[in-house]
Amino acid sequence: MWKRGEVVRPPASGREVTGAAAPELPGPPSPPPVLHAPETEAKRHMDKDVLNIGKSVVFKGELSGHEDLFIEGTIEGKVELRDHVLTVGPNAKIKAEVFAKIVIVRGEVVGNVTASEKLDIRDSGSVEGDIVSPVVAIAEGAHLRGSVDMQKKPVVAPLPAQAAKPEVKMGTLPAGGPGPGSQRVAGA
């Protein structure tokens, strides 16, 4: 029984203050408590495979990966996600060459953008640079300054200048004199 000077506390972990088990109340059973164990959190993040770069992050250099990327910070250099989606958030400032499967721009991009499937510039987005993509969507209110090349074939990265053209050497045959066959092309 309760007395005036006594402090009443709720039962702790299904037991009354006396140590006896709390009586079961009639009615529907209550759902089990939801536990947010580290394993559950990890599973949730593994399902999405999206990397977030926050507002306060400043990155300079080459950024590449094999998962989708959401950028809110500042990036300078090169961003390469050939088979994934790059989302430039509304607070992002990107000064880079961009290569991705799908590029969604809600912030600011200064540099050339190559998207193998689609480029989508939203109403708050801005792109200053050349665009190469088979599908380009530009919302009303978006900003674009540069050229647009809408290729129908998949976009392939250009080869370096040295590997693109074969080396051709001119040579002279010994003691042949002028005439046909006095010079030949080696490597052709």
Image: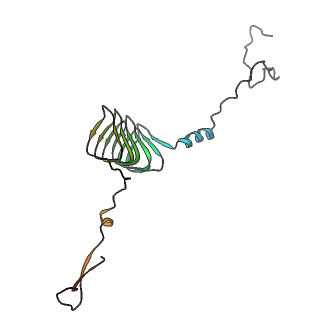
Residue 118: where, in percent of width, then height?
38, 44
Extreme residue in the bottom direction = 175
| Residue in front for this viewpoint, 15 or 100 | 100
Q: Quadrant of the N terminus?
A: top right
x 61%, y 39%: residue: 38
Q: In this rendering, is residue 72 above or below 131? A: above
| Drawn side of residue 5 relative to residue 102, left or right | right
Residue 72 or residue 156, whichever sits in front: 156
In the rendered view, would you say 161 is above or below 140? Answer: below
Quadrant location of residue 34? top right
Q: What residue is at 77 percent from the left and 8 percent from the top?
A: 3
Closer to the camera, 21 or 152? 152
Name, please, the residue furthest toward the left. 178
Quarter that holds the C terminus: bottom left
For residue 24, above or below residue 98: above
Image color mode: rainbow
Residue 10 at x, y = what percent? 72, 18
What residue is rendered at 62% in x and 38% in y? 40
Left/right placement of residue 17 relative to residue 83 reads: right
Residue 126 image position (x, y, % from top left): 31, 37
Total of numbered circles in the picture?
0
Q: Position of residue 66 (x, y in %)?
A: 47, 50
Q: Residue furthest right?
A: 20
Q: Pick out the residue farthest to the front.
A: 152
